[in-house]
Amino acid sequence: MAKKGARDIALDVLNRVEEHKSYSNLELRHVLDRSDMNPADTGLVTELVYGTIQRRLTLDFVLSQFTTGKKLQTWVRNLLLLSLYQVRYLDRIPERAAVHEAVEIAKRRGHQGIASMVNGVLRNVLRQPDVWERVPKGDAAKQIAVLYSHPEWLVRKWIKQYGEEETKAICEANNRAPHTSLRVNTLKIGKDELVARLREEGHEAKESALSEQGLVLAGGGHAAGTRWFKEGYYTLQDESSMLVAPALSPKPGMRVLDACAAPGGKTTHLAELMGDRGEIIANDVHPHKRDLIAHAAERLGISIIEPIVSDALDLPDKGLGMFDRILLDAPCTGFGVIRRKPDLKWNKSPEDVRSIAQLQYQLLAGLSSMLAPEGTLVYSTCTVEPMENQDVVRRFVDRHPEFVLDSTLQDDLPQNVRAKVDESGAFIQILPHHFDSDGFFIARLKRKG
């Protein structure tokens, strides 16, 4: 494995993803864990895999104009897509180098005929740079889908919900690389002091626009590799996700349930806001994820979290008692985090949206019975799909008159985010381009006394 170059390894990963119908992050980790590449090559492999998958439809459209009538083997198609990605989107790699490497890989894996075909296709693309600007035939949805590399059915859905311009903005933001953000553990350190300490190690951090506890690292880097992370001074978390715990408005001494808690980012945020005083039951359906929550709490010096393992649908029958606050960070399609998980957009279907919305409603209806009178429940997702968000919550409130939408949500949100709260005052939908962060939905409900 160590003798292979970055492009060869990236091609292996792309082939495995296609052959096994698996997720790129898992295949990538499998391959990189067995390799002894330097950090630069590891970064290149990661960029090539995620980037090629992210831009797949655009790359396919361009490739199709130069391979008419040719039947390509999977590995050859992936090699061409990988190479086109470098040519179009990676400025630091000379075009000739990308072509040369592709031809060498084709020789090693195939024969001279395949190598000649690969060379011919890529050089033809280089001779016609306007190919990247060509617009596919069809209506606006078809064109946006190809130009911004998103499934056509999803683009049509978004155009209906958000309009053409907003849909373009969502898709464009989904194709940008996410930045690294972190949440300061205020139980251990102040934000200004952490900024100073990070600077000592060569990390420049600026304040988040979305969270009082948030920082954004310039230039990325291995933020989980610093001594400050290991000693529990911060948690890696997207800025949008940092809005969820404050929206629940937890207070010291309260009983709190985090129903779908792993890996524990929001759970530990709740504990920090509570000053590590009170009780948090952190549930997840997977036993190995209980350990993730426990380890996160231990690293951060938090003592009030009790991790448990259960299907969240079964929690009302567990005799856990009533809670002052309940967080349901519901399972969802994840359409708000496509920039982090590019496979998502290709692996989901309209039926997935419908079926997961039904599960979300069942979870909300069941868990609501565990909320004490005058208590607060926050429902959140990392998707931008109204069927999984506003529709679920409105359906629940319509059928449960003991619950009302809490129109004071904005009081617990940062000033520059409040404009995104809708007319009900209880919902906020962050889209990926609003703050260059993940797409996130938050709703706040209160139980009547």
Image (spheres, rainbow, N blue to C red):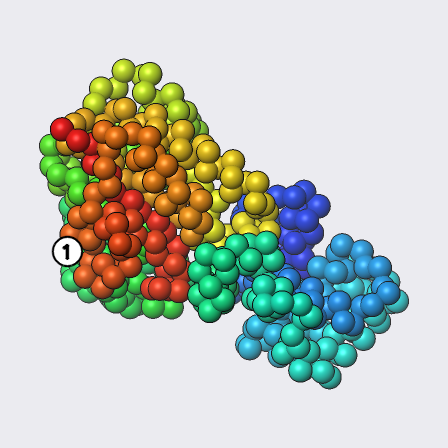
- Looking at the image, is 7 positioned above or below residue 243? below
Query: Is 4 left, or right, of 43 in this rendering?
Result: right
Q: Name the residue type under label 1.
A: Gly
- Which type of secondary structure does the marked residue at label 1 adopt? loop
Query: Is 384 left, or right, of 108 in this rendering?
Result: left
Q: Position of residue 147 (x, y in %)?
A: 59, 69
Does the image show residue 64? Answer: yes
- Report the front residue among 289 and 246: 246
Q: Quadrant of the C terminus?
A: top left
- Report the front residue among 71 and 413: 413
- Looking at the image, is 442 positioned above or below residue 435? above
- Report the front residue among 164 and 169: 164
- Looking at the image, is 192 positioned above or below residue 317? below
Q: Position of residue 233 (x, y in %)?
A: 23, 50
Q: Which residue is mark 1?
A: 190
Residue 105, quarter of the rendered image: bottom right
Q: Residue at x 32, y 35 (%)?
A: 398
Q: Position of residue 151 (x, y in %)?
A: 60, 56
Does the image show residue 227? Answer: no
